[in-house]
Image: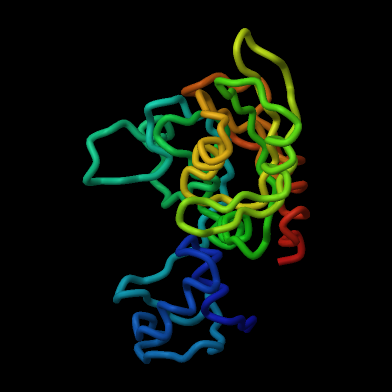
Amino acid sequence: MTKERVQKILSRAGFGSRRGCEDYIRDGRVTVNGRRIRVGFQADPKADEIRLDGNLIGKPEKKVYIAVNKPKNMLSLDAPGDSRPSIFDLVKDERHMYPVGRLDFNSEGLVLLTNDGELANRLTHPRYEHDKEYEVRVSRRPDEEQLEIWRRGVVLEDGYRTLPAQVDIKAYTKSGAWLSIVLREGKNKQIRRTGARIGLPVLQIRRVRIGPILLGKLQPGNFRYLKPDEIKTLLEYTELSNR
């Protein structure tokens, strides 16, 4: 028999990150062969009967990794009580998928969908500070002082100070500019709030990269499955290649 920690078995089966699966165990929702267990308990997924909320855990799901180009005026999460369209209307998959890199309703660009809960946690938890790159159109031409303030970090209206960011001018428009911005965090509407704070109202946001994964030529409203080499690179980037 090959035994391993139950939280790892649950995570691999698509029920969330290992940390989240530990919470299921602490809450008494997980049993092995009819008995509630504690965090750290080991089991053999081939020989033992593992249940979550009374439901038998089957074979681990095949991991899937999808890149979506979210259009404007679309949600980037599954919100059953919200009548607005969602990227989950674009990607029809029976597996429970986690959105990586949520975007606000009016923003567009790259979002990843995966049933790999551990990877989703690594890419979204603030402590890992993974890069996300954006193309941002502002309504005014920024001066060097404004760019430097954004680069150093800005104190938002709620008192939170943003982390340093990489901010460069990509191109000038008639009255404003396109900026290239790389963030290592993702506070709610952070780019729009930062722009408003320093006098650079944001007109458009397009995310073009999450970690090593590029939006590329994927058109708005379309999606694609990541290629094996992209998956390998993503797992190495998040230090999950040796799971």
Rendered location of residue 191, percent (x, y): 55, 39
Front one among 87 and 43: 87
Residue 81 seen anywhere in this rendered image of the structure = yes
Rendered location of residue 223, percent (x, y): 53, 29
Does 159 appear above or below 9?
above
Q: Exactly how many numbered labels are in the figure?
A: 0
Front one among 203 and 185: 203
Does 243 appear above or below 69?
below
Front one among 73 and 234: 73
Residue plotted at (59% across, 57% down): 161
Residue plotted at (52% across, 24% down): 204
Does 95 appear above or below 4?
above
Residue 198: which quarter of the image?
top right
Does 13 appear above or below 197?
below
Rendered location of residue 194, percent (x, y): 55, 42
Front one among 80 and 229: 80
Residue 198 horizontal side relative to residue 167, left or right: left
Q: The N terminus appears in which quarter of the rendering?
A: bottom right
Rendered location of residue 8, percent (x, y): 57, 73
Residue plotted at (69% across, 14% down): 172
